[in-house]
Image: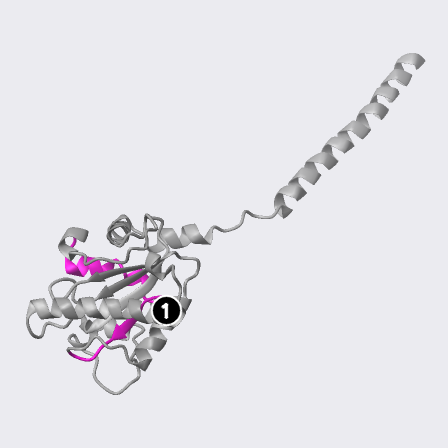
Amino acid sequence: MKSIAHGLLLTIGLCTPLWLVRGWMQEAHASLATTRPQAAVATAAADEAGYCTASLKQIVRKVAGACGLIQQEGRGCQPADAAKVVSLSGEDFNALFAPLEQRVHIIEYDANSVDVDEDAKAAISKAWADRRGASFFFVVARASPDGKPEVNQELSAGRAKAVLDHLKGQFADPDIEKQVGLLWLGEEFAQLPESFCSWQRSRQGKEGVCDAKTINRSAFIAWIDCQI
């Protein structure tokens, strides 16, 4: 009997530390789980999901291809026929850029002019500086529906090129033409409604009225960081 009792006591004495150790290990694992650093937030992926829709990517990809940007040829941008670039209504085309309101700058021009004034130059430089790691600078130029369509097509083309010319003159960067894509729409496609007057404009706060005509004497510029 004494030997049996002695054996039971010995067994209990050996098991108790194992039970305690097991409990301590479980607590340690729980503590590590709660204090382990969380995975870094992928901000680029969040931006991509925010506004890089399939339609916007399609537009960016086609303009980039027409400009030789995808192949990094740097051969400059060629005129793009909006009807071939997108299969959207003008309203839907403009809606693609709504999430970029805080990033877009609208460069304003005088009627029948492609000249960038000092306010426009400052706005172009500010937009260019807001790169945030993006690799593609998008320029969409328009003209108000005054005069002949062919003249307005030339005006919008001249306005888009004026943005590129200013960047080339300001920064003397040989890679600029590999990063800037131009699309000019004339008066025939995707006219901006007056509501865009509230966006960042080069003449915001200046004398003069912003209306449906003046807002379309413009170039719409921004860095786009969609993966194309």
Q: Residue at x 34, y 56 (%)?
A: 178
Q: Residue at x 88, y 16 (%)?
A: 7
Q: Is residue 1 visible?
A: no
Q: Percent x, y for residue 190?
A: 16, 63
Q: Quadrant of the N terminus?
A: top right
- Residue 181, by quadrant, is bottom left
- Residue 111, by quadrant, is bottom left
Left or right of residue 60: residue 41: right
Q: Is residue 149 above or below residue 5?
A: below
Q: Is residue 95 above or below residue 110?
A: above
Segment tinted magenta in the rendering:
87-111
Q: Residue 98 in magenta?
A: yes
Q: Percent x, y for residue 12?
A: 83, 23
Q: Residue 164 in magenta?
A: no
Residue under circle 1?
127
Farthest residue toward the left? 148
